[in-house]
Amino acid sequence: MHPPYRQDHKLPEVTLNVVLAEESNPPDGATPIQWLFVTTLPIDNPGQVPQIVFDYTIRWQIEIYFRTLKSGSRIEDRQFETLDRLLNCLAVYSIIAWKIMYLCRLGREYLDVDCKIIFEPREWKSVYTTVRHEDPPSTPPSLNETIRRIASLGGSVIRRSTQPGTQTLWFGLQRVHDLSTAWKTFGPD
């Protein structure tokens, strides 16, 4: 592609490659999926084409990651005096955003796993008691149930048909910290 004209400097030309990906065996009665990718990545050999398709399939997860990072941390609202402070804050929040996305995925994929693989007893018990208004059971609930309850603390509405999002989980986890600290300090254990 030829670059647009700039009066003050010349932009370089860009070589684009086009990849057409088609679903070869769609379900009966369904229209096959077709994706047309325009990319600057090389396609010098046939082995590079599947990598381009794979890279695009994870694009949506990258979008969710950055939305989680921006909305959960509210990084744009932070007022630091130096770039170093902002970068340190961003480094910590990047890890938190990744962990929240990971937690969402675990809750969706492992429905019958006990929540104790992630949460301490004081965390899941305090959440259970706060959301259900009853004493916690002797056996831990599933990870999916616990994540749903935590997200409800962050504003998510618990429905069977939907899974909580990363933003409500982020806000709910902030409440979990407070609840579990209170449970540890004043609770029945």
Image (cartoon, helix red, strand yellow):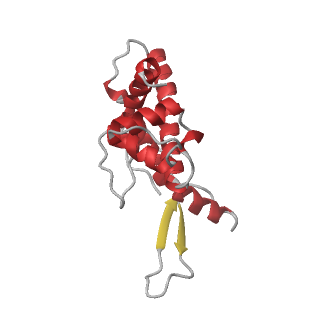
Q: Nearer the viewer, residue 66 or 101?
A: 101
Q: Classify residue 115 as left or right of residue 149.
A: right
Q: Check the image and report above or below for 178 versus 102.
A: above
Q: Residue furthest bottom?
A: 29
Q: Nearer the viewer, residue 48 or 54?
A: 54
Tell which residue pokes out farthest to the top in this image: 81
Front one among 158 and 11:
158
The image position of residue 175, as x and y in percent, is 37, 30
Q: Is residue 134 visible?
A: yes
Q: How many marks?
A: 0
One can see residue 15 in this view: no
Query: Seen in the image, is 151 located left or right of residue 102?
Result: left
Residue 17, quarter of the rendered image: bottom right
Is the residue 96 above or below the residue 111 in the image? above
Question: Image height check: is 109 above or below 186?
Answer: below
Q: Position of residue 118 (x, y in %)?
A: 56, 38
Q: Is residue 156 above or below residue 112?
A: above
Tell me which residue sits at (51%, 26%) in the image.
91
Judged left or right of residue 148, residue 117 is right
Residue at image point 38% right, 36% down: 129
Residue 170: horizontal and vertical position, in percent?
40, 36
